[in-house]
Amino acid sequence: MVINTNIAAMAATRSLAASTNSLSSSLARLSSGSKIVSPEDDAAGLAQSIRFDAQINRNRAVQSNLANAIAFSQTQDGFLVKAQSALDRMSELSVLAQDITKTNTDRSNYSVEFVQLQSYASDIGTKSFNGVSLFGDYHPVPVGYDGVNYNGNPVGKEITVDSDGNKIELNTINYNGRLKWLDGTYGNWLSQHFGINRAFHGSGYARGAAFGYYGLDITNTTSAASALSNVQTAIQSLANLRANVGSNLQRLKFSSEQVSILNENLSTANSRIKDVDVAEETTEFARYNILVQSGTAMLSQANLLPSMALQLLG
C-alpha cells in the first residue's frame, strides 16, 4: 500500500473518463438520430452517406422537373381536347352546309360559327405554360434557304429525367407549324404552315394570309365539301398530336416512378449507414449511465486508500 501514487484511483479515473465519453456519444446519437455525429465515428460511412445524400437531392430535383413536365403535357392534352371538340363541330357544320335544302343565309350563319371555331382552333397553338410555349409552333429555316427548298426541324424542349443528367425531348409537337423567315421574323409576306393550319388553308404558301384561316369557308356546298376534307385532315393531325402527348406522358410517368423507386432504395441504404437504432442505442445509453455511476463510486473508494495507509502509521 502506497501513499504518493494511487494506482487504483488512476485506473478508476481512466475507466470513468471512457464511460463518460461513451455516455456523451450515446446521448449525441440519440439526440441527433444519427450514428455518425462526427467524422471519427465512421469516416468511410460518412463519405458514402454524403454521396447518397447528394444523389437523393438530385433525384428530388428530377422528381420536381418530372412533375412539372407531366403537368405541361397534361395541359397540352387539355388544349388538344378542346381543339378536338372545335374540329368535330366544324366537321358537323361542313356537313350541314352541304344540305341542298339549306339557303345561302343558313350557310352564312353556319359559316360565322365555322370561322370562329377555326380561329379558336388555330389560337390554341399559341398557348403557353408558365411562359413556355406548349406547342412547337415554329420551324427555323436553315441559312441555306433559297426561297424554294426548306428543311426545318421542330424546336423541341428537353427535360432532365434522372440524376445523371440524361434528358428526353418534351415538346416535339408541332401544332400550327409556321416557318421562320431568314431574318428571324415569321414571314413578313410569305409563310408556310404545317399541322392543323396546313389543313385550314391547304398546301403551299399563303401570301399575306391571316394566320390559320385562309381560303376556307362553308358558304356554298362546294366550299363546304372542300372544308370538310380539310377538317378531316386536321382531325387526323390532331389525333397524331394527342398520340405524341400520350407517349410523352407515359414516358414521363415511368421515369417518375423509376426515380421514386431509386430514391427509396438510396434512402434505405443511407439509413443503414447513418440512422441510429433507437432501441439499441437506448440500451447502450443505460449501460453507459450505469458504468458512469459505478465508476464514480469506485473512484471515491479508490481515493480513500491513501488514508487507510495513514492508519497503519498510527
Image (cartoon, helix red, strand yellow):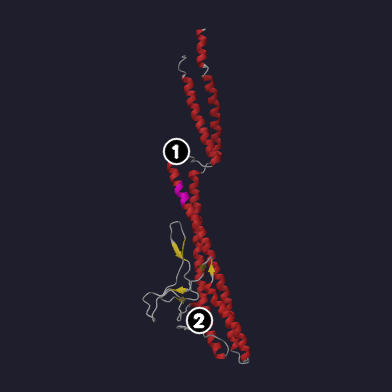
Task: Locate residue 62, reporting x and y percent.
Answer: 49, 58
Q: Disc 2 versus disc 1: distance between alpha carbons?
A: 71 Å
* Res. 297 image quadrant: top right
Residue to which mark 1 is pinned = 40
Kindly state the secondary structure of the residue where label 1 is placed: helix
* Residue 180: in magenta span: no
- Give the main secondary structure, helix, strand or loop, of the magenta stretch: helix
Up/down of 217 relative to 172, above or below: below
Residue 199 numbered tag? 2
Q: Earlier in the sequence, mark 2 or mark 1?
A: 1
Which residue: 60% across, 88% down? 97
For this rendering, which residue is in front, 215 or 218? 215
**Would residue 11 be found to the left or right of residue 93 on screen?**
left
Up/down of 37 relative to 160, above or below: above
Instruction: Give yes or no for contact between labels 2 and 1 (Cβ–Cβ under 8 Å).
Output: no
Which residue: 49% across, 45% down? 272
Q: Amino acid at mark 2?
A: Ala
For this rendering, which residue is in front, 168 or 182? 182
In this view, the residue farthest toward the left is: 144
Kindly state the secondary structure of the residue where label 2 is placed: helix
Task: Locate residue 292, reporting x and y percent.
Answer: 54, 28
Q: Residues within 10 Å of mark 1 (few under 14, many from 20)?
A: few
Q: Residues within 10 Å of mark 2 (few under 14, many from 20)?
A: many
Task: Locate residue 221, reporting x and y percent.
Answer: 57, 90
Q: How many marks?
A: 2
Q: Amino acid at mark 1?
A: Glu
Residue 186 numbered tag? none
Which range is magenta?
A: 49-54
Task: Locate residue 30, reporting x and y percent.
Answer: 55, 39
